[in-house]
Amino acid sequence: MADTVLTAWQRSPLADAAHRLAAVTRSSRGAIRLAELPFLAQVNVRLDAKGPAADAVGLALGLQLPLEANTVVHAGDVTAVWLGPDEWLVVGRPGTQGDLEGRIRSAAGDEPVSVTDVSAQRTTLLVAGPRARDLLAHGCSLDLHPRAFGPGRSAQTTLARTQVVLVARDEPRAGFWVLVRSSFAGYLADWLLDAAVEYR
């Protein structure tokens, strides 16, 4: 189980790349914005989508778990990402994974449910700006046009040959979350920095 309390000695997977990511925003004059969103709480939830636990868990989180494939629901500081017919990734503010787990387990009651803290598994990159879709399209085979992958859409896909969960945020200007395994985060950040050169 991952540590649920942030401490001074914890370093994000991309701590050393923060200045290079910020430099892209400055040099591209806002066309591309890259940043790490470190330590987001991430809880994997599996339960029967048609059972009473799904509604109860949604109520406890303040949102309805998305039932449509490859969609995202956002309410306040909590985001639920559809991963499968009976699986979701619940994302919250850093350090809230224990609270999220407790709320989900309590709401499910005696219904069968699997709740796993996977916060340490991935980090999150924010890719935003008017050219964000163009940048991602360099390494992603999905159709990222707003008609096909607009706000509220998500996908488990590959970006630069790296497995990621890609989330189109609620508002077009909010950009994309790219959730990537921590061990591949450095490689993916380097790829994004290299691909963003043409926008500087």
Image (cartoon, rainbow, N blue to C red):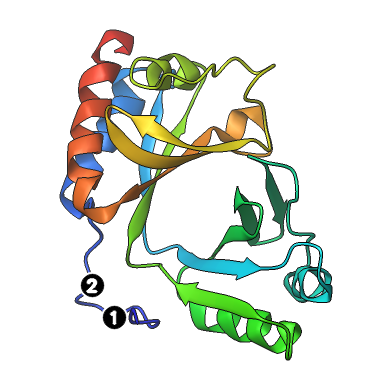
Q: CA distance from mark 1 to mark 2?
A: 6 Å
Instruction: State the mark number for residue 10.
Output: 2
| Image coords of residue 53 (percent x, y) | 77, 76
| Image coords of residue 176 (percent x, y) | 51, 35
Residue under the point 48% across and 65% down: 42
Residue 109 occupies which quadrant of the picture? bottom right
Image-based side of 171 in relation to 37, left or right: right
Residue 113 occupies which quadrant of the picture? bottom right
- Which of the image's four quarters has the N terminus? bottom left
Residue under the point 74% across and 59% down: 65
Instruction: State the mark number for residue 186.
Output: none
- Which of the image's four quarters has the C terminus? top left
Image-based side of 172 in relation to 130, left or right: right
Mark 2 burial class by Cα count in 10 Å: few <14, some 14-19, many 20+: few
Q: Secondary structure at mark 1?
A: loop
Q: Are marks 1 and 2 in contact (CB under 8 Å)?
A: yes
Q: Amino acid at mark 1?
A: Thr
Q: Which one is nearer the viewer's eye here, 120 or 108? A: 108
Mark 1 burial class by Cα count in 10 Å: few <14, some 14-19, many 20+: few
> Which residue is labeled 1 in the image?
7
Query: Is residue 199 something one can see in this rendering?
Result: yes
Q: Secondary structure at mark 2?
A: loop
